[in-house]
Image: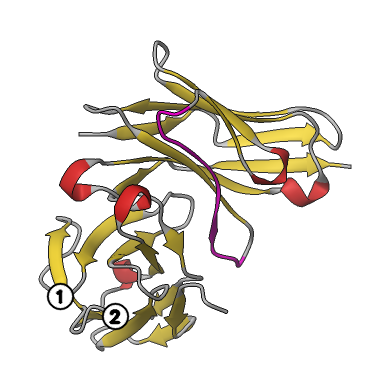
Amino acid sequence: AQSVTQLDSHVSVSEGTPVLLRCNYSSSYSPSLFWYVQHPNKGLQLLLKYTSAATLVKGINGFEAEFKKSETSFHLTKPSAHMSDAAEYFCVVAEEGTNAGKSTFGDGTTLTVKP
Amino acid sequence: DTGVSQDPRHKITKRGQNVTFRCDPISEHNRLYWYRQTLGQGPEFLTYFQNEAQLEKSRLLSDRFSAERPKGSFSTLEIQRTEQGDSAMYLCASSPSGRDTDTQYFGPGTRLTVL
């Protein structure tokens, strides 16, 4: 069984300051981990994906995530927030093997960016 | 646009009516997934197909729900005798075969409102 916990339901930052969205996961296997973003009235967009190639993953729009196996964490960061980053962010763990792709989502973190 | 498409985008129905949603995946993606998302929560897995074969159904998918992918291309999700608790966003995603089969691309969703 696998699960995802997003530790903050809401995060508020000022424009130009760093962003940290926290995610812990539980998986029986070496997981595939993702971050997706959902803007209001828009579909889920893939931000980045972790496989096993590198623990620091770079995504789109300046976002990064670091996989820490010892802490079972996959936190999402961005050095400087932009107003357009305001959205809902989901951390996702995907199964491997024959069920590859079947995903478990966290409950989401709403990011607010203040001017 | 060659992304995942869903139709309709919005559906309002009365309790007890049947509804059917359609999903067209990215061309040549052999896996197709259905999720349900309620307000304030992350998407929850419902079912998925590999080509025309339905490989797994969540226990969330009651007997009133049925999904098909008859020719391994588009898929339909039908809800019979709708209930107010069925009101949600229904999301479809697809993924390719091979190394990136766990990477899902989402459609814009169908928002269902049951009155």
Q: Between disc 1 and disc 2, whose residue precedes?
A: 1
User: Going by the image, does B17 lie left or right of B12?
Assistant: left
Q: Is residue A42 above or below residue A100?
A: below
Q: Quadrant of residue A105?
A: top left
The picture places residue A107, in percent across and down from the top left corner, at 44, 42
In this view, the residue in front, B73 or B46, is B73
Residue visible at 20% across and 84% down? Answer: B71
The picture places residue A9, in percent across and down from the top left corner, at 55, 36
Question: Do the CB atoms of the residues marked 1 and 2 lie less than 8 Å apart?
Answer: no
In this view, the residue in front, B77 or A54, is A54
The picture places residue A72, in percent across and down from the top left corner, at 39, 19
Reading the image, the residue beneath label 1 is: B64
Q: What is the basis of the colouring in this image? A: secondary structure
Looking at this view, name the residue that lies furthest to the right: A115
Chain hosting mark 2: B
Nearer to us of marks 1 and 2 is 2
Q: Secondary structure at mark 2?
A: loop
Reading the image, the residue beneath label 2 is: B73
Q: Secondary structure at mark 1?
A: loop
Residues drawn in magenta: A41-53
Quadrant of the snapshot with the N terminus of chain A: top left
Residue visible at 15% across and 75% down? Answer: B64
